[in-house]
Amino acid sequence: MTGAPEPISDVGRTASERELAELRTERAAVAATLRGDDEVGDSADQADELQRADRLDQLDGLIAGIEGRLREAAAAGAPSTESVGVGSTVTLRFADADEMTVRIGELAEELDPDLVTADSPLGQVLLGRRVGETVEYEAPGGPTTAFVVSIGGEAAA
């Protein structure tokens, strides 16, 4: 990843928003069980209270992370068609002339079968590539070569 704000797919945004809602619901439920300034009973009650407080802190961190990622994605705008980056749609041609279109994503999204994560072998070699370049990567069946046909709407001549 580039360190700059990265786009997020509609599927990724929906999944993130759903996860955020679930985390907020869990946080509210955990927060409602904390006693606050009231004295806690025996040491078992105190330990339980500490566990819930720790979980609340964990949830706050997870919520802040997702909110930050959604803000970053909103600031990133549309993916570039100049070079492959997170959010790019890339059409590849393989040695057997088969073509495949994939989208480069930050996180695996179960609802998106055409997603290639940026940290996968193919995703890693595609990042920063341009139309017309050839990439080599280690696929499950062995070394594979692919030609970048298009990025977004831009195609190789």
Image (cartoon, grey):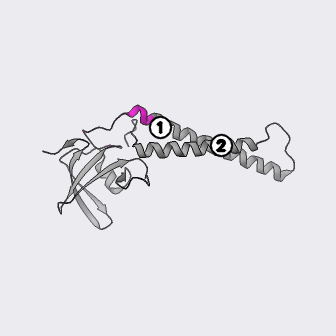
On the picture, is 78 further left or further right than 40?
A: left
The picture places residue 105, in percent across and down from the top left corner, at 38, 48
Which element is circle 2 on?
helix
Q: Is residue 116 above or below residue 40?
A: below
Q: Where is residue 95 in the image (x, y as percent from the top left)?
A: 18, 61
Residue at the image point whose x is 36% and y is 52% from the top: 115
The residue at the point 41 percent across, 31 percent down is: 75
Q: Pick the quarter of the image with the C terminus.
A: top left
Discs 2, 1 touching: Cβ within 8 Å: no
Q: Residues within 10 Å of mark 1 (few under 14, many from 20)?
A: many
Figure quadrant of the N terminus: top left
- The circle on residue 27 is 2
Which amino acid type is marked by label 1? Leu
Magenta stretch prevailing secondary structure:
loop
In the rendered image, the residue lying farthest to the top is 75
Circle number at residue 89: none
Q: In this view, does 121 lie to the left or right of 61?
A: left
Residue indicated by mark 1:
70
Determine whether 27 is above or below 115 in the image: above
* For residue 49, above or below residue 36: below
Q: Earlier in the sequence, mark 2 or mark 1?
A: 2
Secondary structure state at the residue bearing disc 1: helix
Span shown in magenta: 72-85
Q: Does the stretch in magenta take in 77?
A: yes
Name the residue rendered at 73%, 41% in the picture: 32
Q: Residue furthest left?
A: 157
> Which amino acid type is shown beneath numbered disc 2?
Arg
Instruction: Indicate the position of residue 63 as horizontal and vertical percent values.
Output: 57, 40
Magenta run includes residue 87: no
Q: Where is residue 31 in the image (x, y as percent from the top left)?
A: 71, 41
